[in-house]
Image: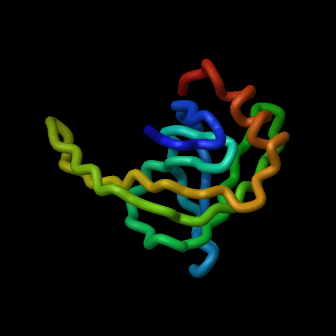
Amino acid sequence: MENRLYERISLPIKLTYEVNARPKIVNETVSKDISGNGICLSLKEKLLPKTILDMYITLSDNNTLKLSGMVIWNRRIDITGDALPATYYDTGIELLNADPININKIITHFYGKSF
């Protein structure tokens, strides 16, 4: 049984992110789920625990919300099939100083929508 303070919501959200310790390279991805204090991303790269990153989510009104987070865990996912094989990393990120109002805006905006 998980002891979570906030409910986790499976929610695919397109976003961009930058790793703080690197030159400013913008990467795109989609979230797997989000909660009031964390987000799980599917990444093409393995980020080490304690890596800090900034994430940017654009709402339909062109309002971009910035979230900062720290990598807590990652899990390798190998995909096989008709297309070329691919490796991704499900990456759990603890949000740092998350504003509950912004988290609510994100969930309200994207909940029930598909890409």
Vertical arrangement, residue 51 with respect to residue 42, above or below = below
Q: How many marks?
A: 0
Render colour scheme: rainbow
Please, which residue is most extreme toward the top here?
Answer: 112
Q: Position of residue 107 (x, y in %)?
A: 69, 31
Q: Position of residue 109 (x, y in %)?
A: 73, 28
Which residue sits at x=64%, y=42%? 5
Relative side of 31 to 7, left or right: left
- Front residue of 72 and 91: 72
Which residue sits at x=65%, y=39%? 6
In the rendered view of the protein, which quadrant contains the C terminus? top right
Tell me which corner region of the image, top left, top right, bottom left or bottom right, holds residue 82. top left
Q: Position of residue 103 (x, y in %)?
A: 75, 41
Which residue sits at x=81%, y=40%? 62
Vertical arrangement, residue 61 with respect to residue 37, above or below = above
Vertical arrangement, residue 34 with respect to residue 65, above or below = above
Which residue sits at x=61%, y=49%? 38
Q: Position of residue 74 (x, y in %)?
A: 39, 59
- Front residue of 26 and 39: 39
In the rendered view of the protein, which quadrant contains the N terminus? top left
